[in-house]
Amino acid sequence: MDKGIIYAISISPERGQLKKEVVEANVIEGYGIENDGHAGDWGRQITCLNWASVQKSNKENQLNMGPGDFAENILIDGIDFSKLLVGSRLRLGTNTVLEVTQIGKEDHPSIVTRTFGVSLLPSEGLFCKAVTGGVIKKGDFVSIFYCK
C-alpha cells in the first residue's frame, strides 16, 4: 500500500532510552522531533517502524510490545516498507515530509535488546531526516510521494 496512518508517536529526552507515547509532536525542519533525544543535525533524526512488524514480533516472541518499546519515534500502519528505498519520501499529515536516509542500522546491545531480547530497528527501521516540519498527530495520514 502507498497510504497509511500514524499509529503512534513516541519520544524520549535522551538517546539510549525507551520512548513514551505522545498524542502529537512538533517536527522541526532539518532537526527532527522537538524534545526527542535523537533530533539534531544528522541523518537519523526520526525513526519509523511498521506497526505490522511490531505485531508479528509480538506473536513470534510472545511479547506485548507497544508504541516506543522498540525505541522508534513513529509507528506507521498500512505502508509497505519494502517499497521504500534510501531517498524515498513520506508525507505525514498535511505538511510534514520525511526523507529516508538509512534502512536498518548496526546491531549493538541496545536498551531494547537488553530489556526485551529482540530488536527491530537494526533490520527494519527507517531512519529519516525532516525535510519540512509541522505538527503531526496520531491518526494522521501517511503517504509515499517520492521513491528513488
Image (spheres, helix red, strand yellow):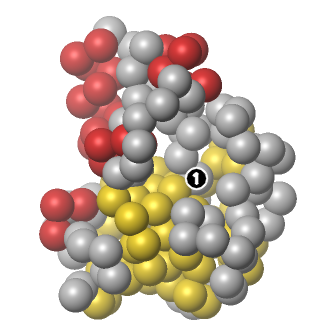
- Residue 36, image x, y percentages: 76, 55
- Residue 78, image x, y percentages: 27, 59
Q: Which of the 4 image quadrants contains residue 143?
A: bottom left
Q: Which of the 4 image quadrants contains residue 48?
A: bottom left
Q: Is 72 left, or right, of 1 in this rendering?
A: right
The quarter in which the C terminus is drawn is bottom left
48 versus 132 height, above or below? above
Q: Which of the 4 image quadrants contains residue 106?
A: top left
Between residue 81 and residue 117, name the one nearer to us: 117
84 versus 110 height, above or below? below
Q: Is 78 left, or right, of 51 in this rendering?
A: left
Q: Is 36 left, or right, of 82 in this rendering?
A: right
Between residue 146 and residue 4, name the one nearer to us: 146
**Most distant residue in the top direction:** 62
Between residue 77 and residue 35, name the one nearer to us: 35
- The amino acid type, in three-letter code, at marker 1 is Asn
**Residue at point 46%, 62% (across, down):** 127
- Residue 80, image x, y percentages: 20, 61
Question: Is residue 145 in sight in this rendering?
Answer: yes
* Tag 1 residue: 73
Question: Is residue 7 in sight in this rendering?
Answer: no
**Residue at point 24%, 30% (across, down):** 56
**Residue at point 43%, 14% (across, down):** 117
